[in-house]
Image (cartoon, rainbow, N blue to C red):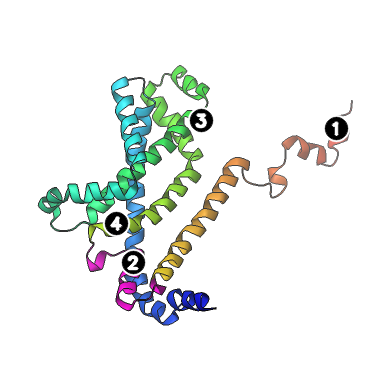
């Protein structure tokens, strides 16, 4: 029973969790959400550009997008964060001073854009070719047809995959601590790590993990719900959703009215 007792005392010290909880709520949780949501928005904007460039007929647009995607999808997230955060630190010092936070967001955005770009590309290419042909037949240029007809339909189809990428960003935000964030900029994992180092107990890290679960598990169910709605549509709730022909047959005298 000694290993179980050691495990319980190391990771389930409620007093250590209670001490770390206020700072995780007031500092760690907001910073984690800022990192993940900002990176998701910036990554989505760049991802759309990569997706359009990746399906372009112009080689000088298609190949750079392909190389960019391969590089940032192939590198480990920690390596990318260190390359951006350390490599661009002198430039960051000139622009906003000794603050690694923007570089952490930039690194996460570049990582996210490579994945989101592929998500958008697959969504756009899943739209039937006849949609583009019909738009062109109506007088739209290729760019207008993509922007007004094809891309909106593709975005609707990739919403579940996009939310999955947001979940990945929430977890990857824990790697930004490599850059040495200020005390007010620490995210959940860094706060848990600091408390663990100060107390010699790992319970604060477990508490941080519980916060990540509290963020990602509901999003997972949101993904499943969105996917179900997009696949099967809104379930019928009453006569208003029935076939109009069936409603006519159900009306009094409708059957007799059809007889000669």
Q: CA distance from mark 2 to mark 3?
A: 39 Å
Q: Earlier in the sequence, mark 3 or mark 1?
A: 3
Foreground disc of the pair 1, 2: 2
The image quarter containing residue 215 is: bottom left
**Disc 1, SS:** helix
Classify 156 as above or below 21. Answer: above
Q: CA distance from mark 3 to mark 1?
A: 46 Å
Circles 3 and 1 in contact, beta carbons < 8 Å: no
In the current view of this chain or complex, which residue is farthest to the left?
Answer: 94
Q: Earlier in the sequence, mark 1 or mark 2?
A: 2
Foreground disc of the pair 1, 4: 4
Q: Earlier in the sequence, mark 2 or mark 4?
A: 2
Q: CA distance from mark 1 to mark 2?
A: 70 Å
Q: Tell me where residue 20 appears, x and y as whole percent.
A: 36, 76
**Circle 3 residue:** 126
Q: Badge 3: how crowded within 10 Å, few (<14), some, or many (20+)? A: some
Residue 202 in the magenta stretch? The answer is yes
Tag shown at residue 257: 1
Report whether 250 appears left or right of 157. right
Q: Badge 4: how crowded within 10 Å, few (<14), some, or many (20+)? A: many
Classify 227 as above or below 26. Answer: above
**Circle 4 residue:** 176
Q: Earlier in the sequence, mark 2 or mark 3?
A: 2
Which is more toward the observer, 5 or 57? 5
Foreground disc of the pair 3, 1: 3
Q: What residue span does the magenta drawing correspond to?
A: 181-204
Quarter of the image where the N terminus is located: bottom right
Tag shown at residue 28: 2
């Amino acid at each position: 029973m000694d290993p179980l007792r050691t495990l319980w005392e190391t990771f389930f010290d409620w007093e250590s969790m209670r001490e770390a909880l206020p700072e995780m709520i007031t500092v760690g949780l907001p910073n984690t959400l800022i990192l993940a949501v900002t990176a998701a928005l910036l990554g989505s904007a760049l991802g759309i550009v990569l997706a359009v460039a990746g399906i372009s007929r112009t080689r000088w647009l298609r190949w750079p997008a392909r190389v960019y995607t391969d590089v940032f999808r192939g590198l480990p997230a920690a390596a990318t964060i260190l390359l951006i955060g350390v490599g661009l630190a002198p430039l960051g010092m000139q622009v906003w001073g000794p603050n690694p936070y923007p570089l952490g967001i930039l690194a996460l955005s570049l990582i996210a854009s490579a994945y989101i770009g592929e998500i958008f590309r697959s969504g756009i290419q899943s739209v039937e070719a006849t949609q583009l042909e019909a738009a062109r037949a109506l007088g739209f240029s290729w760019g207008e047809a993509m922007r007004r007809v094809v891309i909106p339909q593709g975005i609707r189809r990739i919403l579940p995959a996009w939310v999955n990428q947001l979940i990945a960003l929430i977890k990857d935000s824990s790697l930004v601590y490599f850059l040495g964030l200020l005390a007010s900029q620490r995210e959940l994992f860094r706060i848990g790590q600091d408390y663990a180092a100060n107390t010699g107990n790992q319970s604060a890290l477990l508490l941080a993990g519980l916060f990540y679960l509290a963020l990602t598990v509901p999003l997972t169910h949101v993904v499943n719900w969105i996917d179900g709605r997009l696949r099967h549509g809104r379930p019928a709730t009453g006569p208003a959703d029935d076939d109009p022909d069936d409603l006519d047959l159900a009306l009094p005298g409708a059957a007799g009215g059809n007889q000669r």
